[in-house]
């Protein structure tokens, strides 16, 4: 595809690098001279310095031959102008704009409904809220992604010496635990990411991702050794867009909810917005404040301030003072790779969430959702099997999926299957596939007729 990305920030540059490595022809429009020069040195893409909200600049980028136009800057209004230019002036067949406000997404949908082509909005902040709530729903999990309308979880757990899975070969799991259908889909071991085969051993210290039917979650948690949280408090640091929405949606949870915000105005607005949460004006790295609010009784500490370094520091402090789990909003790739070493339990990256949200509009076939696991080494996608595709050409053992690709689940009507044998995918089935990022583009040949 010929792809134009307007905005060379973290989201835009990450998308450009990934799509270029997948073999697409990528052009990036960036109006900041220094950022444009940096991208010229690091990306295998054409870099155009200029204002992407101008038709003349988009023409220089080749918009008249573009298959896809994406606007990924931090400004909703700017992105909507770019999207409308691509839609109404240049008739780009696919347009994706990044927005933060739901009202902007609704407005863009109304403005583009009369035009041909496909027009999409992606909201990484909303996706971050959903990811945090999914993590809170699964005790002990370090990463959780939901598929198939919430019926399937792909959840990552650190394997402890007490886990029943420690030391097992994957081929032994279905023999030893036949009443708990589940599938190991990916393993992170140090710096290595593995999409495993039957003779792979699960080792103590591995971060292992399981595909789990929601009704089987308690059984898998017991085998992993993840105990339900006896602590009841949840503490959220930061009352910005993401933090406030997380707190709002947690108000119905049967736990004490504490929200800490350093900015007095944001704290006041949060106190006026929330009904049950205790809103405190203070610093999230203030040890005395955390101890005063009984940090030792906190089940999960969620750091969501705009300062990602502060999120890491406050998360580490909270755990040292007794919080059971700590999550941190971290969009800096250099910091994200340190998460495991530092002891933070989970990282939420709107940048990577934006990548997944965008990829579902690029992959061939009928793709419902895409998620990138931590560090973007493994990709999970949910797709519908279409008639005449290679997915429906025989049983799983014979359709020739590339090595490193796993079919994690099949949904047929109301029935959800975790495949273990000679299952066949039928037209209309929803399928969740796990693959290494390098192999992901090869799946296009299986998803389309």
Image (spheres, grey):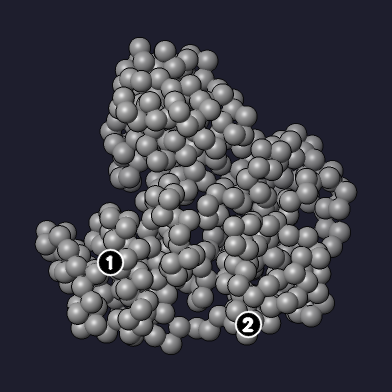
Which residue is painted at 53% across and 63% down in the image? 144
Q: Position of residue 159 (x, y in %)?
A: 61, 75
Q: Position of residue 361 (x, y in %)?
A: 54, 37
In the picture, the quarter occupied by the N terminus is top right
Q: Position of residue 73 (x, y in %)?
A: 34, 35
Which residue is painted at 54% across and 60% down in the image? 145
| 397 to 256, vertically: above or below | above
Question: Residue 386 versus residue 370: which sits nearer the camera?
Answer: 370
Which residue is painted at 42% across and 40% down in the image? 11
Local secondary structure at mark 2: loop
Image side of residue 130 versus residue 269, left or right: right
Residue 13 disc label:
none
Residue under label 2, please give it.
161
Q: Quick check: can you spot residue 327?
A: yes
In the picture, the quarter occupied by the C terminus is top right
Q: Quick check: can you spot residue 350?
A: no
The span from disc 1 to disc 2 (Cα, nearest Å) is 32 Å
Q: Are marks 1 and 2 in contact (CB under 8 Å)?
A: no
- Number of numbered labels in the structure image: 2
| 208 to 428, vertically: above or below | below
Instruction: Rate crowding at label 2 as few (under 14), some (14 to 19) or many (20 or more) other CA atoms within 10 Å.
Output: some
| Camera-side mark, 1 or 2 | 2
| 322 to 170, vertically: above or below | below
Local secondary structure at mark 1: strand
Which residue is painted at 33% across and 20% down in the image? 50
Nearer the N terminus, badge 1 or badge 2? 2
Q: Position of residue 248 (x, y in %)?
A: 30, 65
Residue under label 1, please give it.
237
Instruction: Rate crowding at label 1 as few (under 14), some (14 to 19) or many (20 or more) other CA atoms within 10 Å.
Output: many
């Amino acid at each position: 595809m010929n792809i134009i990305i307007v905005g060379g920030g973290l989201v835009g540059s990450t998308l450009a690098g990934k799509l270029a490595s997948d073999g697409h022809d990528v052009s990036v429009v960036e109006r900041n001279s220094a950022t444009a020069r940096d991208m010229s040195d690091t990306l295998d893409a054409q870099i155009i310095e200029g204002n992407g909200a101008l038709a003349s600049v988009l023409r220089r980028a080749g918009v008249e031959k573009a298959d896809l136009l994406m606007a990924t800057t931090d400004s909703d209004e700017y992105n909507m102008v770019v999207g409308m230019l691509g839609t109404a002036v240049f008739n780009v067949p696919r347009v994706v704009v990044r927005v933060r406000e739901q009202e902007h997404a609704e407005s863009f949908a109304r403005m583009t409904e009369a035009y041909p082509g496909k027009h999409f909005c992606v909201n990484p902040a909303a996706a971050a809220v959903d990811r945090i709530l999914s993590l809170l729903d699964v005790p002990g999990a370090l990463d959780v992604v939901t598929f198939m309308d919430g019926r399937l979880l792909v959840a990552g757990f650190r394997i402890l010496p007490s886990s029943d899975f420690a030391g097992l070969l994957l081929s032994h799991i279905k023999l030893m635990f036949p009443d708990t259908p589940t599938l190991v889909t990916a393993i992170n071991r140090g710096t290595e990411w593995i999409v495993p085969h039957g003779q792979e051993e699960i080792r103590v210290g591995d971060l292992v991702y399981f595909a789990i039917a929601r009704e089987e979650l308690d059984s898998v948690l017991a085998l992993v050794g993840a105990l339900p949280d006896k602590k009841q408090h949840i503490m959220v640091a930061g009352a910005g867009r993401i933090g406030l929405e997380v707190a709002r949606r947690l108000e119905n949870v049967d736990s004490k909810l504490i929200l800490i915000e350093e900015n007095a105005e944001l704290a006041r607005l949060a106190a006026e917005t929330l009904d049950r949460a205790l809103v405190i004006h203070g610093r999230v790295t203030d040890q005395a404040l955390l101890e005063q609010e009984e940090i030792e009784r906190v089940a999960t500490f969620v750091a969501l301030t705009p300062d990602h370094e502060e999120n890491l520091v406050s998360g580490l402090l909270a755990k040292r003072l007794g919080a059971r789990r700590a999550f941190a909003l971290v969009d800096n790739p250099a910091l994200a790779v340190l998460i495991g070493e530092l002891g933070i339990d989970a990282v939420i990256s709107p940048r990577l969430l934006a990548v997944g949200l965008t990829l579902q509009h690029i992959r061939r076939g009928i793709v419902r959702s895409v998620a990138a696991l931590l560090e973007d080494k493994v990709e999970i996608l949910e797709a519908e099997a279409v008639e005449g595709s290679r997915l429906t050409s025989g049983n799983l053992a014979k359709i020739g999926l590339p090595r490193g690709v796993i079919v994690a689940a099949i949904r047929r009507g109301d029935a959800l299957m975790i495949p273990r044998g000679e299952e066949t995918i039928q037209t209309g089935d929803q399928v969740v596939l796990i693959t290494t990022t390098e192999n992901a583009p090869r799946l296009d040949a299986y998803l389309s007729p």
